[in-house]
Amino acid sequence: MKKLLLLMITPMFLFTQNNPNGEYWQINRWEAKDGMAKEFELAVSKKTKKFNSSQETAILTFQIVTGPDSGKYMRVVGPKSGDFFNEGVSGSSEYDYWVKNVMPYVKDQAGNKRTGRIESLSYNWDNSEAPKKYIKFTTVRLNPGEGTEWFNRMRNDAKLKKANDYSGVRGVFWLVSGGQFEIHVVEPYDSHGLPLGKFPNEDFDYMDAYNEMFGWRSLPWDDMKADMAIRDYAGEIVETLEFIPEMSTSIE
């Protein structure tokens, strides 16, 4: 019984430790004052060009185009090591510039969220590539004590897609600090008229491949257990983000 309990809690335990080799990202949501969106965008663009022109200081900006936060902006910093967060920003010239030149146009901001990418649940993620035009951004909140089933399903999905040369891109991130525990599933793409990804073989049967890899009739069973792990209320929120290059560091 003790061994079974250890197996159940180990994944969550590993996800909540300070990992010196981890890949961390910081996100924040900003809302411009009514009627001042253009002024906010221009001020952020100037600040980014002045203080975030290199790979080491890079910041990406997206506008949220669907959901309750439509019209707001998401600023993303990363990838970083854990040591990055030892460096305070208050009192720096960058911070002072933001307060003086950008904050006059800010109505609200959601606060920083620090996240870490889970490599085993991600696929085709390449930090050296330029951002795609859009992101399907899914926030997942799990029932206490039931997260293992969801993680197992996502891990199996990633393993299958990696083994069969799936072309889509996915990054899965867990919340390190900044709120209630949640997971962010990030899927970049360039066109709303195309699928997020595809297999090279047009006749590829996902269900057959999954059941062959993980056991007879395992897909519907794993899907059911993963769905049951998600909270009933606000357990899965899907948003579309659009990349704003003028407000971001140029990555080529």
Image (spheres, rainbow, N blue to C red):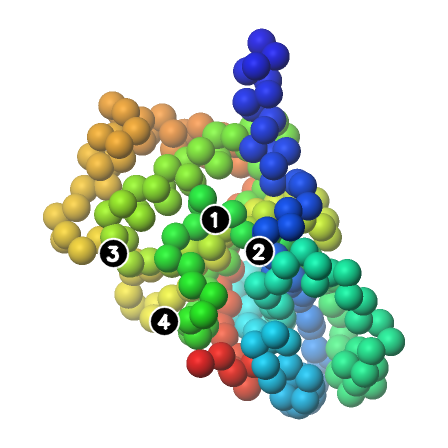
Taking depth in this image into account, of 207 and 252 the one nearest to the observer is 252
As drawn, is 60 to the left or to the right of 156?
right
Q: What residue is at 30 percent from the left and 47 percent from the top?
A: 161
- The tag earlier along the polypeptide, 4 or 2, is 2
Query: Which mark is in front, 1 or 3?
Result: 1
Query: Which mark is in front, 1 or 4?
Result: 1
Residue 214 location (% of width, % of height): 30, 29
C-alpha distance separating marks 1 and 2: 9 Å
Pointer 4 with pointer 3, Cβ within 8 A: no
Q: Which residue is mark 3?
A: 198
Let me know if residue 237 appears in the view: no
Quarter containing the N terminus: top right
- The tag earlier along the polypeptide, 1 or 4, is 1
| Residue that lies at the very extreme toward the top in this rendered image | 1
- The tag earlier along the polypeptide, 1 or 3, is 1
How many residues crowd around disc 1 within 10 Å: few (fewer than 14), some, or many (20 or more)? some
Mark identifier at residue 190: 4
- Reply above or below: 61 against 86: below
Q: Which residue is mark 1?
A: 119
